[in-house]
Amino acid sequence: MRLGIVASRFNEEICSPLLERAKAEAEKLGVNTLVIESVPGALEIPLALQWMAQSGRFDALVGIGAVIRGETYHFELVSNESARGVMDVALQFGIPVANGILTTNDEEQARARLDKGADAVRVAVEMARLRERLQDRAK
């Protein structure tokens, strides 16, 4: 299993433990190759995922980040567009891309969801294995 993770540096106090739990889960699941790339924020995650998908080197990908509501419309923009971008990469390249980008009202809610990094890795690995099974059946 070759897994790529793109992690946002914005809201680092949340993203760092999200990433650490994701890495621990990947190790637990026996991921052979784990490549982690860092980007400035959640809006940059889809483009980096696209570049990873284009490389053909990965069985699955994960985006990790945290978008915490502020006082402006920017929260909705970043939340919606990063999620759309992650889904677009999955559909364009036909590989699993799990969305581990938290979108919360405050830091307390984000801290309560730090296991979502590990959850995203589990989803990506499960979907990659499903894809492999389906491809094997088609042969």
Image (cartoon, rainbow, N blue to C red):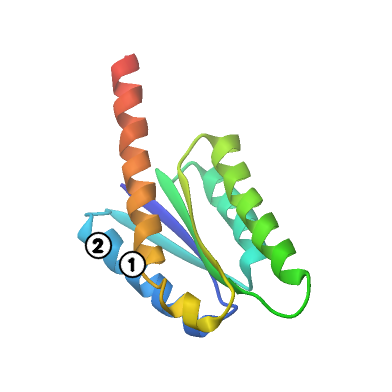
x, y percent for residue 11: 57, 81
Q: Name which residue type carries label 2.
A: Glu
Q: Quadrant of residue 111?
A: bottom left
Q: Name which residue type carries label 1.
A: Lys
Q: Are marks 1 and 2 in contact (CB under 8 Å)?
A: yes
Label 2 neighbour load within 10 Å: few <14, some 14-19, many 20+: few
x, y percent for residue 58: 43, 46
Is 13 positioned to the left or the right of 83 in the image?
A: left
Which SS class for mark 1?
Answer: helix
Is 53 positioned to the left or the right of 21 in the image?
A: right
Residue visible at 29% across and 22% down? 136
Vertical placement of 36 versus 137: above or below? below
Q: CA distance from mark 1 to mark 2?
A: 6 Å
Image quadrant occupied by the C terminus? top left
Residue visible at 32% across and 43% down? 126
Hey, which residue is sitting farthest top in the picture?
139
